Amino acid sequence: MELEHLRAVERAVACIEAHRGGRLDLDAIARAAGYSKFHLHRLFGEATGMTVHAYASRRRLTEAARALVETQRPVADIAREAGYDSQQTFSAAFAALYKAPPARFRAGGAFYPLQLPLELGGPAAGRDGSPAGAADGRAGWEAGTGPWEARAATPADVPAWMDLMRLAVDGFPWLDERRHGAWLRDAVARGRALVACGAGSAALAGAAAFDPARARIDVLAVHPRQRRGGGPARALVAAVQAALPGRDLAIATYRAGDRADTGYRRDLAALGFEEAGLGTELGYPVQWFLLRAEPKDGSGSGRRSIL
């Protein structure tokens, strides 16, 4: 994505953040971005993997959820601040994404974000904590052409991994950063965590963690700017396949029809995963997807490569 197009999306995001209350005004957002509504929709989708409306709605409901848990303000006031004309409309929208009406969510006392503010200025920092730049291959990273390299994560990758999870939080309901950080450090120590970078770049474009005993991928996170291309995800899944040859790989995602899904079912299908059974993870209704290993043939290959 060209730098000016990325800056336009950043201006749109800033406008949405500054006007979370009240009716969503696409004309005002387009003016702030400096592009027509048609071109803004195209650029926004390319940069974030979601529509302008989906991002704005998720941000409003996230801050509403925070207010429900962290304050005692009336639900009607929170609904108005989130831009809803009535408490009934707000409650329906909230329950569709959070799987609980506002009162029950408040009573549970646990907040998690649907969407955090997007910061698209650059990829997550690399092993040394420095931001990516032209000298370390950022040009290739932005082009989305790779080649993508998956490698074992190290303790030095943990801060950048957590930054990436905040950008990709729309794919991880009930994400608790403190618990995830502790879990991640254990996964890194056990050699079960992987990161994807562009060739010659230290910047993280994706991350994955897997459970060898159950042949499942517990985390598959990709920077929003790389979701549509799919390159980092392919490299990471291929690395898990190589670590677990001849085994079907399972991963949990949203169920069909879940309005909280910003395209993760579609992304998994593009990687070759197939729909499987339903389940619940961390109290959230999910569907399992499987990437099936092919029977061993004369070449000795026991898995289907997605590359």
Image (cartoon, grey):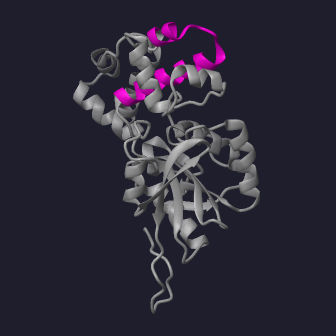
Q: Is residue 65 magenta?
A: yes
**98 relative to 71 in the view: left or right:** left
Q: Eyeballing the image, is 271 above or below 135? A: below
Q: Residue at x 57, y 72 (%)?
A: 242
The answer, for residue 93, to whether it is visible in the render is yes
The answer to which quarter of the image holds residue 12 is top left
Give the extent of the magenta segment. 53-80
Residue closer to the observer: 277 or 275: 277
Left or right of 281 in this view: 101: left
Q: Residue at x 63, y 47 (%)?
A: 126
Q: Position of residue 86 (x, y in %)?
A: 39, 10
Q: Residue furthest bottom?
A: 298
The relative height of residue 93 versus residue 191 in the rendered view (above or below) is above
Tell me if residue 29 comes above or below residue 123 in the rendering.
above
Asked whether 48 falls inside the magenta stretch, the response is no
Of the 4 image quadrants, the one containing the N terminus is top left
- Identified at 55% across, 47% down, the residue is 135
Q: Is residue 53 left or right of residue 240?
A: left
Relative to the observer, which residue lies in front, 168 or 265? 265
Report whether residue 119 is seen: no
Give how far across and how far down residue 46 sits, in percent.
35, 40
Q: Residue at x 64, y 22 (%)?
A: 107
Depth check: 219 or 261 in front? 261
Q: Is residue 302 above or below residue 146?
A: below
Return the x and y of residue 247 as percentages of the image width and height.
55, 74
Q: Examine the residues drawn in magenta and state their main secondary structure.
A: helix
